[in-house]
Amino acid sequence: MSPTRIDATYILPIRRERPDDSEELTDYLEQVAERLEVVVVDGSPPGVFAAHSAGWGSFVRHLPPDPDLYTPMGKVGGVLTGVRHATHERLVIADDDVRYQPAALARVVALLDRADVVRPQNYFDPLPWHARWDTARILLNRMTGGDWPGTLAVRRSILRVTGGYDGGVMFENLELVRTVRAAGGTEVVPFDLFVRRHPPSARHFWSQRVRQAYDELARPVRLASSLAVLPLAAWCIVTGRWVALGSAAGASIGLAELGRRRAGGRSVFPATASLLAPAWIAERGLCSWLALGARVVLGGIPYRSTILTRAATPMRELRRRHGTTRAK
């Protein structure tokens, strides 16, 4: 029996320097295409694009980014191209390392019947050491507003009336959600909707440390908290306040464990990830200073062949731009 079709479009922005010849991604896309329309927007060089088209073109719509939708953050141009060419109102946007199970895919689409944007929760599988380390970030985020995953679901109509979202910022998912909310849209964060994500290579993980810290320039309170970590830790060490330092580390482990236990998270998050919360916080503290240094010295954060200055647009500015969009 064929899977039940879902009236939605799955948008995958991708760019590779070499053809993706993994059968795993091809099999996944084929499985998704059995359930809903799939639009792959491919910014790869011509030879790589042709190879991808040969492998995927029979079951997905394989398109290059529309030239008029070019953005410094190339992923955004790919997403906006997919939004333009999608034939359904309900959209699922996902990075190429995201792997939805059928039930999760059906649920995230269904949630768009009562919200304009849905932010599910990622978990890493498999779990090498660096993914376990980064899982501590996910757990802490689950107690402070929810994780920012590699996938969102959004209603096409609201992105059409806003003219999309800014592709010149580093924290593009936050930019999308803020744009939707500024236009009067509603956001849902289902803490019990878990979507699998393949971990990056260790090399790619290290390359993202400062970039991810730079994202917090869009959220000054979080940035200030991260910048305070190393000075406070140094003060505790110099003054011999080991109990205070240990208590802070223990509190971070406790907070991460609460995030792990929230909404059934124990089914996908290992307990050992909670123990890594102090290490992740220390890493973010160091990388926040490096990110701030990049902002001062370079004017922004390097991304491919350019420098991105802004992490995201302030909400007050987006409200000025889009606050009456829906009313119109």
Image (cartoon, rainbow, N blue to C red):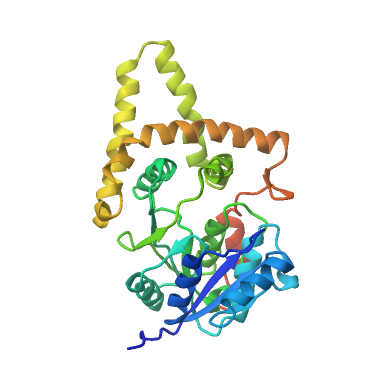
Of residues 35 and 180, the one nearer the viewer is: 35
**Residue 118 percent across, percent down from the top left:** 42, 67
How many marks on residues?
0
The structure residue drawn at horizontal position 74% and vertical position 50%, both measured from the top left corner, is 305
**Quadrant placement of the N terminus:** bottom left
The structure residue drawn at horizontal position 54% and vertical position 45%, both measured from the top left corner, is 212
**Residue 97 percent across, percent down from the top left:** 49, 60
Quadrant of the image occupied by residue 104: bottom left
Of residues 44 and 321, the one nearer the viewer is: 44
Is residue 164 visible in this depiction of the protein?
Answer: no
Is residue 324 visible in this depiction of the protein?
Answer: yes
Of residues 6 and 206, the one nearer the viewer is: 206
**Residue 102 percent across, percent down from the top left:** 35, 73
The structure residue drawn at horizontal position 35% and vertical position 15%, both measured from the top left corner, is 241
**Quadrant placement of the C terminus:** bottom right
**Residue 67 percent across, percent down from the top left:** 75, 71
The structure residue drawn at horizontal position 60% and vertical position 33%, both measured from the top left corner, is 290
Quadrant of the image occupied by residue 211: top right
Of residues 57 and 87, the one nearer the viewer is: 57
On the rendered structure, is 198 left or right of 191?
A: right
Residue 244, above or below 254: above
In the picture as drawn, the residue positioned furthest to the bottom comes out as 1
Residue 56, above or below 47: below
In the picture as drawn, the residue positioned furthest to the top comes out as 239
